[in-house]
Amino acid sequence: MKTCIEELDCVADDAIDIIFSLVDTMLCAGEFDLVDSCLKEDPPQSFHLTIAMLSITLAAKDKLPNRALYCKKVRERLGKDADSLLAGLE
């Protein structure tokens, strides 16, 4: 039987898989406007989900104008640790 933490880890892993799958599908289909509209929203509270979104959109950042604002919001939320946590993702 899994503990509550183990169950939450599984849910988080599933959510990350869903983000990668959906966003990758949209980007490969050239649906940059749709992905960009997602980046207008506030980043999720989960650090792992936020990093997943930054990771999957990194290669297309030049086609996603709202990504810079998304990064700024993430940076503000992370505060003094932002530089180390976001290295290579902006």
Image (spheres, rainbow, N blue to C red):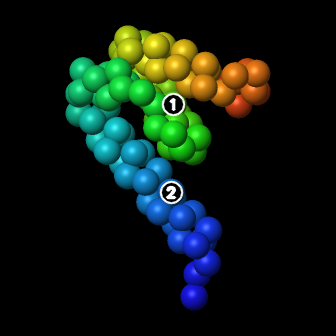
Disc 1 residue type?
Answer: Leu
Residue 63 placement, left or right of 82? left
Image quarter where the C terminus lies is top right
Task: Classify mark 2: residues with Cα within 10 Å, few (<14), some (14-19) or many (20+).
Answer: some
Q: Residue at x 54, y 15 (%)?
A: 72
What residue would you read off at disc 1? 54
Residue 40: x, y in percent? 35, 21
Residue 78 placement, left or right of 28? right
Residue 33: x, y in percent? 24, 21
Above or below, 7 relative to 32: below
Closer to the camera: disc 1 or disc 2?
2
The residue positioned farthest toward the bottom in the image shown: 1
Image quarter where the N terminus lies is bottom right
The answer to whether one can see residue 52 in this image is no
Using the rendered view, name the quadrant where residue 2 is placed.
bottom right
Q: Residue at x 52, y 20 (%)?
A: 73
Q: Residue at x 36, y 26 (%)?
A: 41
Q: Distance from label 1 to label 2 (Cα)?
A: 16 Å
Above or below, 20 relative to 67: below
Residue 24: x, y in percent? 36, 40
Q: How many marks?
A: 2
Residue 22: x, y in percent? 31, 44
Under circle 1, the secondary element is helix
What residue would you read off at disc 2? 12
